[in-house]
Image (cartoon, rainbow, N blue to C red):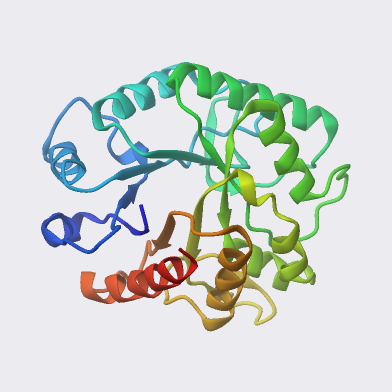
Amino acid sequence: MGAGLGLKPNHYEVASACAASGLWFEVHPENYMVGGGPRLAWLEAIGSRHPLSLHGVSLSLAADCQPDEMHLQRLKALADRVQPALISEHLAWSAWRGQYHPDLLPFPRTGEALNRIASNIQQTQDVLQRRIAIENPTHYLRLDGHDWSEVDFLAELSQRTGCGLLLDVNNVYISAHNLDFDPTVYLDAFPGDAVMEIHLAGHSVDPGSSALLIDSHDAPIVEDVWSLYRRVIARIGARPTLIERDDHIPEFEVLLAERDTAQAVLEMAR
């Protein structure tokens, strides 16, 4: 696996036909956890030609409860069906007392939170019978009550559970801008041996405040993020890298060109 793309329904046919070296595709499993239908058939068809990755957005691993068992079983059924090369989720919560919120929400990085999230990750891996990767979050404001730095927290989760990590370079860039820290310090300390996947994406400026960047996934990747990505790859070596675009989606060839930029970085590292 080299550099991949997020798979969008309007790109199914051209994506399936693309023969670019190292190409793979990632989807949100929540859109495919069904018993059949055309969307699942397309995913299986593309999976017969390219590696697939499942990137979950609703397991709510940082919630104060266990993952929903029915959700886990549906995710397992999909994974058993399409045999993804990678499965990942977020270091965040989105469910509270049976209610789902349309966002990936932060939490204080305490010892209690560490124990709870480690347990939830282990339960997920036990059900799936697969190792998963956990993604670093995007931050928009300072949250008090942390006992651990984010890098140390993620490293400890990996040590305790055997999970891998998904390093989203754009998330680091946005968080560094919004919280005023140096992204290179964060990235240089990130445990490279645990990185199973890297994400790259574009972002936007909040219309209400030019000082706030939003992880919108609706624009090309900026040069500052490319520069950070090259720095990471130079340190830890080549890793499967995904180009994310979830809004204002251009033609497939436009996304493929961004993907080819990442592929060139990976090939140089190899």
Most foreground residue, 104 or 233: 233
219 versus 190 height, above or below: below
Q: Quadrant of residue 94?
A: top right
Give the image location of residue 234, x and y in percent: 59, 68
Position of residue 131 in the picture relative to residue 31 (left or right): right
Q: Quadrant of residue 31?
A: top left
Most foreground residue, 185 or 206: 185
Give the image location of residue 16, x and y in percent: 14, 54
130 versus 145 height, above or below: above
Position of residue 212 in the picture relative to residue 222 (left or right): right
Q: Quadrant of the C terminus?
A: bottom left
Task: Please tell me how many numbered marks the rendered image carries.
Answer: 0
Residue pictured at 33% horizontal, 72% vertical: 260
Give the image location of residue 163, x and y in percent: 59, 33
Residue pictured at 25% horizontal, 61% vertical: 21
* Viewer can see residue 80: yes
Most foreground residue, 214 or 222: 222
Residue pictured at 79% horizontal, 45% vertical: 152
Residue pictured at 44% horizontal, 66% vertical: 266
* Viewer can see residue 64: no
Position of residue 131 in the picture relative to residue 3 (left or right): right
Give the image location of residue 97, x and y in percent: 61, 25
Position of residue 111 in the picture relative to residue 103 (left or right): right
Most foreground residue, 218 or 266: 266
71 versus 236 height, above or below: above
Q: Quadrant of residue 129?
A: top left
